Image (tube, grey):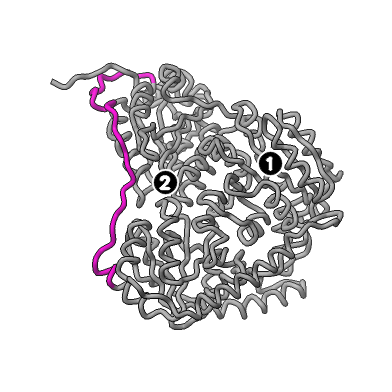
Amino acid sequence: MTKTIRLTMAQAVTHFLKAQMTVVDGRKTPIFAGVWAIFGHGNVAGMGEALHQVRDELPTLRAHNEQGMAHAAVSFAKASFRSRFMACTTSIGPGALNMVTAAGVAHVNRLPVLFLPGDVFANRIPDPVLQQIEDFGDGTVSVNDAFRCVSRYFDRITRPEQIIPALKRAMQVLTDPVDCGPVTLSLCQDVQAEAYDYPQSLFAEKVWTLRRPRPDSDELAAAIATLRQAEKPLILAGGGVLYSQASDELQAFAAAHGIPVAVTQAGKSAISDTHPLAMGAIGVTGTSAANAFAEEADVILAVGTRMQDFTTGSWALFKNESLRMIGLNTTAFDAAKHDSQPLVSDAREGLRLLTEALGGWKAPAAVAEAAATRKAEWMEAAGRATAATNAALPSDAQVIGAVQRTIGGENSVLVCAAGGLPGELHKLWQAVKPGGYHMEYGFSCMGYEIAGGLGVKLARPEADVVVMVGDGSYMMMNSELSTSVMLGQKLTIVVLDNRGYGCINRLQMATGGANFNNLLQDAALERMPDIDFRAHAESMGAVAVKVSSIAELEKAIGDSRANDRTSVIVIDTDPLITTEAGGHWWDVAVPEVSPRAEVGTARAAYEAARKAQRIG
């Protein structure tokens, strides 16, 4: 006879979560590092009571904003290379909807997070309850249906026993390298409190390990044959290399066969930027070295990348008409993009097998020679862009240089997400250790930065976590700055204030538009804001200072090392200066008709550039 234990549905959830384990560095550890919770009427009685019972085994963390805590959970999973993750619970209504943006971040970046939003009453007797929307044509709809398009798996629990298969399916998705992404279990608030006789086996400890699928023999043979014919090969490394923890194999493969490596935003740090074959960033925000190889490549081995438009220069970067691409990816959907030869495999296993099969084959010596020359030329250009300056308003690149010189290194993790900084950092930041560069550029979500830094610090408490954030993103979400202080998780936050959305202002100008509604000075205002970011950060509990030069910035970063909590350093920057070296065209549609001559000129250039796009 099956042994059972009587629990509420919410208690079943928490007891199940604490029993799920994994192995990290040879040690068994809980796969759920904790649960972020902001309680409301839709989860405080059910999930709140259940979490309190297991608080010593499954930590509950309190945040200030539901989107912020969900970003922290996303960044924790990313910084953990998907080996561990977190859950998030909220009430119904706005609390739940606040997490949808973060679910989009997790979905785009293929990151595991378990969302547990409260939902309406399954029995419907008290309907409509506080915060419940009503669909006039569908009685089953709630706001949580918004999670469906940004969840890899979605389920609404309307009976307590339904949680049994739902939790099992959730774990399969969260730990699957192919299907990996956010899971939403929408928990009806009355059902959270209902009891059921659950089988004790549901709460038995289970250890989850990383699945490493090996390639099909025919696909492997085809990839080997294509590589052997390459005269100008290039490796394109994406985030899948880091998720697979295949950095050593990537570096060994490149060195053994003399192939240069370019990196996507998600893949940056998969190979040290100090490696002689590391050409740095590719695409729209790429280095001159990486993009030169991309333009002429006849074979590209794309490892663990979904080939988004910033990577491919909107599919106009690759100029060689004879180009063949090999898509080494755990996901067939990504492996076959744009007629690539698919090599469906775990990155580490695939690279190992390719290395073994290729044996002593190497790319022509001219490739390595070109790599040395191009890398040297790029590093010289990057050095000029990041050099210290006495300018009243330094550029983003000059601020990056100061941060790199003072706190960049093997023990640092650089965190950023949106605006102009990602483009500059992708090109200019020197990442030396896997995971040392943490950029959310799949969804490019403004407001991720500070909360993301908190998640990284929770995943890597020994690291110096440095968050670089513009004033626009800071204003969108800064509440988890206070959470970092409250939890004793020290961050170093550099706020670059260019008084508006400088990146989009530059894009507006580049497409012929008038300066309008991006910089504060160009918006409809009764009064120009004068925001004191230093005072605001200080009021949130941080140690804060404003500096007026690059020299002062470097000193302030050095001084911040002695601080016992999160430190914020504010500096004014120029909204118009960007690094001219490197980069590539990006497909941003320009109006065909406009009274502005500048738009007409931009449209003509746009139409000319589109002719280089590969279609297929």
Instruction: Say which of 93 and 540 sits in front.
Output: 540
Where does residue 31 sit, x and y in percent of width and height? 39, 35
Q: Is residue 97 visible?
A: no
Q: Which numbered disc, 2 or 1, marks the residue closer to the eye?
A: 1
* Amino acid bearing label 1: Ile
Q: Indicate which disc, 2 or 1, sits on the residue closer to the N terminus.
A: 2
Quadrant containing the N terminus in the rendered view: top left
Q: Residues within 10 Å of mark 2 (few under 14, many from 20)?
A: many
* Amino acid bearing label 2: Gly
- Which residue is drawn at the image coordinates 52% and 67% (left, top)? 277
- Residue 580 located left or right of residue 201: right
Q: Residue beneath label 2, please?
A: 181
* Residue 492 vertical placement versus 381 (above, below): above
Q: How many marks?
A: 2
Q: Which stretch is magenta?
A: 193-221
Q: Residues within 10 Å of mark 1 (few under 14, many from 20)?
A: many
- SS label for mark 2: loop
Q: Hey, which quadrant is residue 174 in on the image?
A: top left
Where does residue 274 sit, x and y in percent of width and height? 57, 60
Q: Residue beneath label 1, please?
A: 493
- SS label for mark 1: strand
Q: Is residue 205 magenta?
A: yes
- Which residue is drawn at the image coordinates 48% and 20% (left, top)? 44
Where does residue 251 sit, x and y in percent of width and height? 45, 61
* Residue 398 vertical placement versus 59 (above, below): below
- Residue 358 located left or right of residue 388: left
- Which residue is drawn at the image coordinates 29% and 68% (left, top)? 220
- Residue 62 located left or right of residue 201: right
Q: Is residue 477 magenta?
A: no
* Residue 132 vertical placement versus 413 (above, below): above
Quadrant containing the C terminus in the rendered view: bottom left
